[in-house]
Image: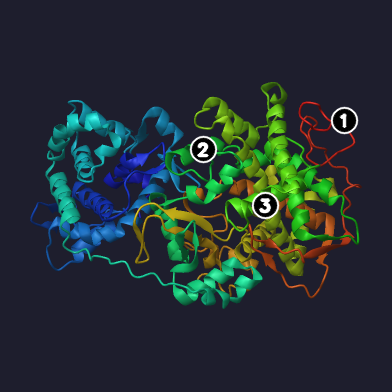
Amino acid sequence: MTKVDEIPIRLSEELILLMLNERSGYLEMVPGWNFSCVMAGAVIADLALADRIDTDLQVLYVTDPTPTGDNLLDPTLREIAESKELFEAQYWIERNAARSEEIVTATLERLVERGILEYRSGGFWMLSRDVSRSGSYSTSDNKIRQEARARVLDAVLTDVIPDPHDAILVALMHTCDGFKLVLSPEDYEEKLKRIEMIAKLDLVGRSVAEAVKQSSVNPKTRRVLQGKPIPKLGVVDLLRVRDFRSGNMAKAMHEIFRKHGPVVRVPFKMNKQPVVALMGPDTNQWVNRHGRFYLRSKDYIEGLERLFGASRTLPGMDGAEHFKMRKSLHGAYSRATLARRLPELIHHCRQSIGSWNEGDVFRATGTFQTHVSRQVSSLTMGVDCSHYVDELLEYEHRALVIGVQGLLPKFMLSTPRMKRGAQRVVQLQEEIIASHTSALRKGKPLDIADAILELHRNDPQFLPETDLTFPFVAAMVASIYLGSALGFAVYCMVRNPDVYSGIRREAEALFGDGREPKPEDFTRETIDVTHRLLLEAGRLYPVIPWQLRTVMNPCIVNGFELTPGTRLLVCQTAAHYSGDLFEDPLKFDIDRYLPDRVEHLQPGAYAPFGLGTHVCLGRPWVELQMAVNLLLIAYHVNLEVSSESYKLGINPFPTAAPNKKLKLRVVKVTNSVSARKHAPAPPREPDGLGNRNGPRCPVTGIRA
């Protein structure tokens, strides 16, 4: 195939650019038959512009069967050329509507490769900085072309006569009512006659647009899809699944998927609404591609928001607001931000490990949650809450169980112990705000609290002061997840001696002989075994095995119709145990991530960080933090499970974590922290490690 930079910018590419809403980060048009026909029509029109076909309202025929070298166009050209009959454009548009998802995916990837779009995690796209600034991009013949939206709007709103390419764009946009999305209602009404006039300027555009219109209102080939009845599970059906009792929700939901299919109604309700579970790689792909149009997240999180006095939060937002919040916080959650503070991360980690002595036995989950929370509070919030972190985590844990899962009554947050925890939440916010004045933060690296407070200062209506507590608390809640994930990862490492040895070797190469590694030293090659162990631990024991969503628009998933108001349990990690995707899925095997296997890269196969627009924003940060922690643990201590007969049990609520019976023993301190002369944390940053001997600042409460 021809290189992308040698291929002209196609109609389908500029149609995507016209439909892209930069405020929301995704396409305006809801996927469906009309959208599919429009994208197929763009390919047909591009073939005509490339002088490979010709068409009128009666018939479409090939004028030149020579491949264009473009994988967007050639499959359609080949199919038309090999046909023994002549058909009209409408027939071929409907035939190729089945390729619309493939066309859209390839088009978006091509726009990114051209440097016109940038991709953001969560399935968001935005114009690249260069294109956004200049309002133009380069073409295959090294000419500068004005950006599609500006050109088309210029043609519609002024007397400029568009070229055939742009006239076809106008025709296709008009066919799918696209101008209602990019023009104000007043401008649309005023310019409707001009839009209709431009749409008729080009014969090919007129023919294709008319065929698309006819396909929408009177399809000739589309099979009408009837929604199948959704299978219903009884309570007994759930009780028969052994893994529910052991707490492994991902494995249990795969068993349900294997027996009952990808869409199943489960025997309980949420807020009096029926609950439907989605499972398997196909539904994972559907949520990734289309969830933004049909699902919302607000309903499941609003109970937790109310507990913290918030009305709008990142996990509770959808659409343009969600995209704006993600863009505002993207830099603070990046790997690069954590990498710049690598010495601090190493320092905090070693301080905790330094308290472990030979022969010590400790509970894995609680120890690692506290271990990670001290890092998180200092690195993300710039405060030392180590002296009350246990009370803080206990309160947040209870709030999750009550506010999200509804497993306990609300009065359980009013016990004396929980009231003290609530006071700690207030204390945390006060310390964060007091320590994040411009004077106190001068010269210090950006942290997440800085980004949140800056967003509040710049747009207090978007993020009011009443909503500040939740994002601060959310960072600490994340430490619960990370601590649980680290517990699973350490368990996997300890139970697999060969892998443990491989991680020790990587740790020795990075930290041995007094070395202080730099961020660029942590590459996929230098931490290969560590990285693959973390991937496998995340597959076998995902800490967030499912997501909760509400259907907001009627849709059909895998042939099953979902009605508005239905609560969904999106079990994205059920696919982790599929034998069709992962060889011997019950086996711990880090080799499944080697370049010649990469089983996790199969579509819809691997999703420990969630799906769709709400995929974990901090994944790059998490991957680096987890790797550093695991490597340092392997370098400094030799651990074992305290009971050789222990079989991993999982506490599934509020998120998956090793149960309290998992205890680890320090067999040997292999490289003493106290004996090592390592660089201390930068002096102006609170160390987050519970140094209780220095005087406490009367304003921030942080000890010197």
Location of residue 398 in the rendering, given as x and y in whole percent from the top left corner: 67, 52
**What residue is rendered at 70% in x and 24% in y?**
442
Q: Which mark is residue 695?
A: 1
From this view, report whether residue 4 is shown above or below residue 472.
Answer: below
Label 2: few (<14), some or many (≥20) within 10 Å?
some
Q: Secondary structure at mark 3?
A: helix
Tell which circle, 2 or 1, labels the residue nearer the N-terminal end.
2
| Residue reaching furthest to the top | 439
For the image, the number of numbered tags is 3
Label 3: few (<14), some or many (≥20) within 10 Å?
some
Q: CA distance from mark 2 to mark 3?
A: 32 Å
Q: Secondary structure at mark 1?
A: loop
Tell which circle, 2 or 3, labels the residue nearer the N-terminal end.
2
Residue 177 image-quadrant placement: top left
Residue 592 image-quadrant placement: bottom right
From this view, report whether residue 435 is shown above or below residue 82.
Answer: above
Location of residue 330 in the rendering, given as x and y in whole percent from the top left corner: 55, 39
Disc 3 designates what residue?
412
Instruction: Specify the amino acid type for callout 1.
Output: Pro
Which image quadrant: the C terminus? top right
Q: CA distance from mark 1 to mark 3?
A: 35 Å
Q: Which mark is residue 325?
A: 2
Q: Colour scheme used in the picture?
A: rainbow
Location of residue 376 in the rendering, given as x and y in whole percent from the top left corner: 70, 43
**What residue is rendered at 44% in x and 36% in y?**
128
Location of residue 565 in the rendering, given as x and y in whole percent from the top left corner: 40, 55
Which image quadrant: the N terminus? bottom left
Instruction: Specify the amino acid type for callout 3.
Output: Met
Q: Is residue 530 left or right of residue 359?
A: left
